[in-house]
Image: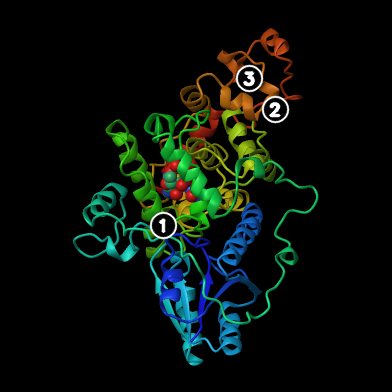
Amino acid sequence: APAILWFRKDLRLDDNPALHAAIEAGGPVIPVYIREPARLNIGPLGAAQAWWLHHSLAALQASLKSLGGDLILISGKAEDVLTDLARKTNAKTVFVNHAYERTLFDRGIAIELKKHDIAIRAFHGQLLHEPKSIRTGAGSAFKVFTPFWNALQKVGEPQEPTDAPTKIPSPEHLPPSENLDHWALLPKKPDWAVDFGRMWTPGEAGAQEKLRNFVDRELHDYRRGRDLPSVEATSLLSPHLAHGEVSAARIWHAVRGLPTRASEDIAHFRRELAWRDFCYNLLTEFPELHDRNWDDRFDGFKWEYDPKEFHAWTMGLTGYPIVDAGMRQLWRTGFMHNRIRMITASFLVKDLMIDWRKGERWFRDTLVDADPANNCANWQWVAGSGADASPFFRIFNPVLQGEKFDPDGDYVREHVPELARLDRKYVHKPFEAPEHVLEKAGIELGKTYPKPIVDHAFARDRALAAYRDIR
Ligand code: FAD
């Protein structure tokens, strides 16, 4: 009998256990991608990821075609689409990989399908290890990363990856597909994604290339360089992982066998990769991670909201260069360096006292790697409301952070061109520069570049006072 293969967050042929099993089942395979209406954790799709998804689906469709298959695109509720597809093709089984952010929905969908005698077979391919397999001695989920990481290393290596198939058995006729262009996932005018294509190649081939580059340079300088935004030391694999274009297990194993001098960088990199597993672990434990404080003392926190300040933050016009550089990198490229994510998020939550959920939503809409577990867990980490969170009272000073991690101001100069000619000494604090220094750099504060929208010392005291109220 034919098998339906339902692609979701696993837009790849390499190391794809559901695809593998569907082929093993022996009949023809019917690959489908469903554009579902938004529900709790599934969507609405952010604008940057819609751009990505368009290109990723086109790439997957092309590679399936080259192996004798194809990808059918259908819009609708998953249970309706799958029932209808099964009826048209006589399929009795749907093969999927778990996407842990949607476990609850998937349960409902499985129940609906069962009423029509359609079975779902779900496989583990999203993370290094299935969330349930890493538990405390008492059998509960870990709430702190380090013991989680220790336990993860003890359960052994992630499963050995399987290669992509060389042929996709296809039925005589596939049911009709919708036209990807009609899904209108790409931005209309103005095309704010013009620069995305320079940095990213969505799809499996792009993912493999990023992985190859990273391995070829032997993860050089990862440990030190990963904190410096002007150095390209990290893998840039996050948007590919977010769409499942490469498996975490494939990445884990790919860094094996490098020379010993790389071993510290490898260990550190794998630890970061395990953060992703940890975030999913938190999400499966607490599916409202995007909406509710893990630490419910924060439910009483007195957030403020000034729409003008929020807007200035989103546009990179706060008057703090490191914050503005990050927000503009995000807008222009769909990505932001990890250290800078921490600084910009902290600025929103602690200097502007704006609810972390507003920041999480903005990132979700603008990041190409927006991820329901990583984004929410990290925002809560920064806000101090998370499980294993940075304490609220540790407040980043945006000037000192800038001077520490972007000492020459290269990152600021790249993303905030109006400060490009400013002396190194003032590049993170133009508001302290003497008039003649500003003049020489062609800067008129308040005109060509904003004055700080908030005084950091004042903001810090205000945030600490609000925190005392809930403590
Ligand atoms: P590398 O350093 O090469 O790391 C490899 C992989 O490890 C990453 O691709 C990612 O999958 C994982 N990883 C690394 N750091 C973390 C982390 N702190 N938490 C979870 N996984 C991690 N990451 C996302 O993938 N999606 C998000 O939506 C997201 N939102 C974030 C929001 C905030 C406020 C903060 C502080 C961090 C967020 N991160 C998010 C984590 C991190 O910034 C990115 O994963 C990282 O910058 C991606 O770059 P890379 O692939 O080059 O990372």
Q: Visible in this render: residue 356?
A: no
- At 20% from the left edge and 63% from the top edge, which residue is drawn? 138
Name the quadrant containing residue 430. Answer: top right
Image coordinates for residue 30, horizontal then vertical, percent: 55, 77
Residue neighbourhood size for the residue with mark 3, other residues' Cα within 10 Å, grouped as few (<14), some (14–19), many (≥20): some
Q: What numbered label is drawn on residue 296? A: 1
Q: CA distance from mark 3 to mark 1?
A: 38 Å
- At 50% from the left edge and 32% from the top edge, which residue is drawn? 232
Q: Residue 206 or 141: which is nearer the viewer?
A: 206
Residue neighbourhood size for the residue with mark 1, other residues' Cα within 10 Å, grouped as few (<14), some (14–19), many (≥20): few
198, above or below 408, in the image: below
Q: Which residue is denoted by mark 3 in the rendering?
A: 431
Residue neighbourhood size for the residue with mark 2, other residues' Cα within 10 Å, grouped as few (<14), some (14–19), many (≥20): some
Q: CA distance from mark 3 to mark 2?
A: 9 Å
- At 47% from the left edge and 32% from the top edge, which residue is drawn? 396
Q: What numbered label is drawn on residue 193? A: none
297, above or below 61, in the image: above
Residue that protrudes farthest toward the right in the picture? 189
- Are the residues tagged 3 and 2 within 8 Å (C-beta)? no
Q: Residue 45 or 60: which is nearer the viewer?
A: 60
Which of label 1 and label 2 is nearer to you?
Answer: 2
User: Considering only order in the chain, which callout, 2 or 3, is on the residue closer to the N terminus?
Assistant: 3
141, above or below 144, in the image: below
Q: What numbered label is drawn on residue 450? A: 2
Name the quadrant containing residue 182. Answer: bottom right
Q: Secondary structure at mark 2?
A: loop
User: Considering only order in the chain, which callout, 2 or 1, is on the residue closer to the N terminus?
Assistant: 1
Q: Amino acid at mark 3?
A: Phe
User: Considering only order in the chain, which callout, 1 or 3, is on the residue closer to the N terminus?
Assistant: 1
Q: Is mark 3 within 8 Å of ligand 1?
A: no
Q: In the visual, does 97 lie left or right of 421?
A: left
Q: Amino acid at mark 1?
A: Asp
